[in-house]
Amino acid sequence: MTIKGKSRKQIQWNGEAMIEIGNNGSEITYTNYWDSEHARCGFCYLSANAGVWRLLVPPEGEVMLAEMKTGRSVSIEPSLHEPGRCWDVVFNDGSDAPFFVAVDKQQVDRAMLQRLCRLTVWTRRGKELDLSCEVNT
């Protein structure tokens, strides 16, 4: 549904609504993710809109923000630790061992296409980080 440049995306599983995300371009205006079973279980969620990937971080995962903020850019690539099952969101800080988050492909709402873009990191408080991103498929 789109009304005056705003949209709402509803992610379904087995025909039931699970995650709803309201969008204004790349900005998230509403989501029920924070109160979802996914967030309670500690799963991050990757959503895309208007050419920007948004990483939603659950409350218990907010301890990762300090590590994420060391990144100068981000890459999203097939997981080395969970091949075929996850995407690694790598926060490139110039070191040989950058911080990364593995996100299960079931926790991603769009097909991953190789390209340059932006990635924003969101918590219940709002947008925490905005970095350039390279998606490698």
Image (cartoon, helix red, strand yellow):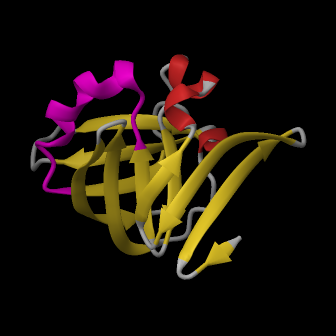
Quadrant of the image occupied by residue 36: top right
Q: Is residue 62 above or below residue 12?
A: above
Q: Is residue 36 above or below residue 70?
A: above
- Along the viewing direction, whichever of 47 and 27 lies nearer the viewer: 27
- Along the viewing direction, whichever of 7 and 42 lies nearer the viewer: 7
In the image, the segment drawn in magenta is 56-73
Q: Quadrant of the N terminus?
A: bottom right
On the image, the x and y values in percent for residue 62 come to 28, 27
On the image, the x and y values in percent for residue 88 come to 43, 43
Q: Is residue 83 left or right of residue 63?
A: right
On the image, the x and y values in percent for residue 123 come to 34, 38
Quadrant of the image occupied by residue 14: top right
Q: Residue furthest right?
A: 15
Q: Residue furthest front?
A: 4
Count of numbered circles on the image: 0
Could you tell me if residue 137 is visible in this image? no
Q: Is residue 39 above or below residue 28?
A: above
Which residue is at a point 36% across and 75% down the rendered structure image?
116
On the image, the x and y values in percent for residue 54 come to 42, 54
Which residue is at a point 65% across and 75% down the rendered structure image?
2
Which residue is at a point 54% across and 27% down the rendered structure image?
35
Could you tell me if residue 60 is visible in this image? yes
Which residue is at a point 38% across and 46% down the rendered structure image?
89
